[in-house]
Image (tube, grey):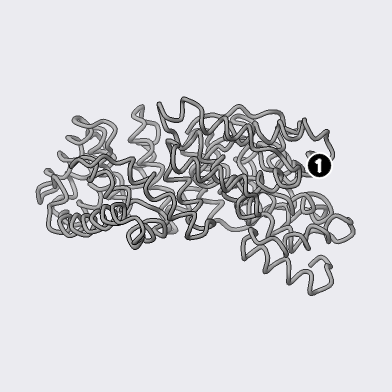
Amino acid sequence: MFDPDIAPSGTLLGLLQRGRGDGPLHALAAPRAEALAAVEQCVLRDPRLDWRIESRSLYYARLYSDLEGSLDGIEQHLFHTDDLLAPDEHRCGLALSVLGHLAGYGRRDALHLLRRYAARGGCWDWALDELAIRDDENGLRSLGPSVVSRFPRTPEGDAELAAAVREAYEPRPWQLWAEDTSRPATAQRVRKAAEQVSFDRWQRQLRSAGPTPGWSVTAVLEWAQQGLDDHPAVERDQPAARCLAAVAGPEDHAELLEAALRGPSAARAAALRYLADRRDPACLDLIETAAVCVDERVVRAALESFERMRDEAALIRARQWAARTDPLGSAAARMLARRGGPQDAAPVLAALRRIVQTGGADADGLDPLVEGVGRLAAGRASAVLRHLYRETSSSQLRGTAARALAAGDPGFAAGFAVECLWDCEEATRELAAHQAASGDVRVLAQLRRLAADPAEEAEVQTAVRGRLSSGGTSR
């Protein structure tokens, strides 16, 4: 993932980039031109640390709607020369999703822009998915010839068309085009592509999945290492560990222990994963040794294997390792955060503070620690949790911090919970719908808006309507 340039949390741009609820509140109070410029910068330069799990599109679409913002900037961005030379979903995906929500709110200019981009743009399939759930049948049918003509009438073009049909997230447009009698040429090509998809699926079921290891522990370990030597970007240690589960017997134990202690990179990682999954008595000592290895692959296999363990022996060892300041100590603290009891609150909180101090509010591995602190020591962690809530660029981590604060900070309901009603994350808005104190005059108005918004998620609306039916009092 790329590392976005995030503005300070106290600025309007920084609030909007983080998706915080205070962002819309400040944007509506700022000069309109300044607010629109900040929103547009966020949409055109996606600020998310991980676009696969963080929400922003509805958040920004609501701001465009409230500010009655022009779409000229988005149009120029989508139809820039770079889009055709090097189509990139990371560059255009957020803007297309925002247009989809705006089309859902009735913005005809957003709908027409999506249609134009689906016909001419580089990431046309994303735009088509947005239109599939928002456009009418006539609008979708009109796009058929433009989209299908992207694929030349050659064997390669037909194969690419079949792949597009197979990989479509929303099948509705393709189904309409296949049944469109007014455009027989387009319909015929789409039907033929759909038939090819079915044939390809049948062939894949008959075809071998590719090279497989031999049926012995030695062969599996060699296969894992060969994959690393031949294709460094393709890691085989996890599938190799699953293969070992099928072929390893008691007579192979000594070979596996030796591989986990001194084997080459991929073979050692596979043996570590296998022994940890089988709760071998020696696996915890092997993990401790591997965790300080210079080989990153071996260290990752050791830590991941340890964190998956659920037995009492692993928990006891985690309590011994949690005070360490290396990656093994952090992994041990995460295990205690997930599975520990009240006696483990101090080391979990200490690990959280240490990682925030050394790695900042966006350091790796914070989510389980924040969740664990909320479960074990929420009352003692309010200061670090508030810091994470304000500073982190991850809207997922901010939501986790909000839930931890709700569990132990008496000021949450009248403070951050009110802001959370405008947050970009569905789960955070749902939490706020339950928790926000009704003494703030903005709360009831926002609850009513969320209840009436057709784009709002069902879980949020359920919480909001339950709150409104109870008279808006905090629970």
Residue on which the image places disc 1 = 28
Quick one: 410 or 159, which is closer to the camera?
159
Residue at figure coordinates x 48%, y 52% from the top left? 316
- On the image, the x and y values in percent for residue 27 come to 78, 39
Residue at left 49%, top 54%? 139
Q: Residues within 10 Å of mark 1 (few under 14, many from 20)?
A: some
* Residue 221 found in image quarter: top left
Instruction: Tally the numbered discs.
Output: 1
Quarter of the figure with residue 22: top right
Q: Is residue 3 visible?
A: yes
Q: Nearer the viewer, residue 124 or 368?
A: 124
| Residue farthest along the bottom direction in this orientation | 469
Instruction: Give the left or right position of residue 244, taking residue 285 as reference.
Output: left
Q: Quadrant of the C terminus?
A: bottom right
- Secondary structure found at label 1: helix
Q: Which corner quadrant of the image does residue 457 belong to?
A: bottom right
In this rendering, position of residue 380 left or right of residue 239: right
Q: Position of residue 156 (x, y in %)?
A: 21, 40
Q: Where is residue 424 drawn, in percent x and y?
A: 66, 48
Q: Is residue 264 left or right of residue 330?
A: left
The vertical placement of 152 against 111, above or below, is above
Q: The disc labelled 1 sits on which kind of residue?
A: Leu
- Residue 99, given in percent of the width and then of the height, sits at 58, 45
Instruction: Using the image as rendered, state which of residue 394 and residue 354 is in the foreground.
Output: 394
Most distant residue in the front direction: 182
| Image: 394 above or below 417 | above
